[in-house]
Amino acid sequence: MSTTEADFIELDDVEKVFDVRRRAGLLRRERRQVRAVDGIGFRVARGEMVGYIGPNGAGKSTTVKMLTGILTPSGGRLRVAGIDPSRERTRLARRIGVVFGQRTSLWWDLPLRDSYRLVHRLYRVPDARFRENLDRCVELLDLGDLLEVPVRQLSLGQRMRGDIAAALLHDPDVLYLDEPTIGLDVVSKAKVRAFLRDLNADRGTTVLLTTHDLGDIEQLCRRVMVIDHGRLVHDGTVEELYAAGAGERTLVVDLERELPPLEVAGARVVRVQGSRQWLAFPASASAAPLVAAVAAACPLVDLSVREPDIEAVIARMYAERRTP
Ligand SMILES: Nc1ncnc2c1ncn2[C@@H]1O[C@H](COP(=O)(O)OP(=O)(O)OP(=O)(O)O)[C@@H](O)[C@H]1O
């Protein structure tokens, strides 16, 4: 097998084109092609935890479906652990776990424990290994009181934890997570994130995380890939994403009294509220000369520098790509 640890997941110029037919009149039907994934290439090393983000309809789910073998690429080359997913879907299934936050892979009417028994048999997990994995998941995901409860009676957060456990009982090398914290409250989100962090650190499970919750990315991933209109528009660290998209930082100053908007070289006041003013300045510039200039111009009580948040960075990236 040619797979190296660095090329655990490999995509070269992968495409997926859907043929869509739609009614264009009473009798006429129009054929149209949707290029959902348009020539994507990347490598994920074994043990990496990578974010895969983008706006609605960008092509994230289509990519994940090709990585699991549910969909066959229209072009390009794709391998997971050296396996061509669409050709050897069953063999690959033993190596991967998948969690789709929007729907469950558990049996709705069965208690959680019975769903796990079915996973045990389906994947022919050795008994001792299964027990060990189940015990670990039950402990770390706090499932002890839930094992006898039918899935339909579980809350969303409980069900999600149940689903994550189900995806891991056969010891997959790779875990695909599609919106694993969607709709969860703060406490459940924190539990799921802590579990995933430990899983990646302790077991070296490779994780590809698709999410609209950028908090997931900030807290879990060093590397993030951004897809838009089927193309990869960023592949790098979260810090690089900031640097690429962050236009401005903000200096927030509390003055001794209310003053008209300050006039300081290299910055512009973007908001005034009582004695507090917000000054935007280029992200690439140092804040020090600006602070000195403000301090020289008026009496200061307090100040802080705010980095743009990741949502603003990404919104800006998308906006820039759309303006010709
Ligand atoms: N089976 C299909 N047939 C036709 N078009 C499809 C099919 N699946 C996806 N598409 C189209 O492909 C594009 C990419 O869809 P995809 O579901 O991969 O996006 P996404 O990034 O996962 O979006 P979201 O964040 O909304 O889940 C969209 O334009 C979608 O309408």
Image (cartoon, rainbow, N blue to C red):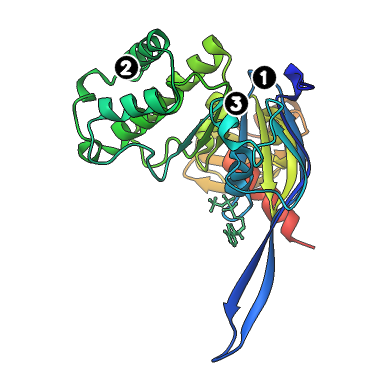
Q: Which residue is at 67% across, 19% downward? A: 46
Choose the circle earlier in sequence order: 1 or 2: 1
Q: Please determine whether, in this image, residue 157 is positioned above or below residue 28.
A: above
Residue matched to label 1 = 46
Q: Which residue is depicted at the point 74% across and 40% down?
A: 234
Of 290 and 134, which appears nearest the observer?
Answer: 134
Question: What amino acid is found at the position of numbered circle 3 in the picture?
Answer: Cys
Q: Residue at x 74, y 35 (%)?
A: 235
Q: Quick check: 153 left or right of 318?
A: left
Q: CA distance from mark 1 to mark 2?
A: 25 Å
Within 8 Å: ligand 1 and the Cβ of disc 1? no
**Along the viewing direction, whichever of 300 and 179 lies nearer the viewer:** 179
Nearest to N terminus: mark 1 or mark 3:
1
Tell me the quadrant of the picture where the N terminus can be found. Answer: top right
Q: Position of residue 253 (x, y in %)?
A: 57, 34
Residue in front for this viewpoint, 162 or 192: 162
Q: Which residue is mark 3?
A: 221
Residue 298 visible from this viewpoint:
yes
Q: Please determine whether, in this image, residue 294 is positioned above or below residue 35.
A: above
46 or 322, nearer to the observer = 46
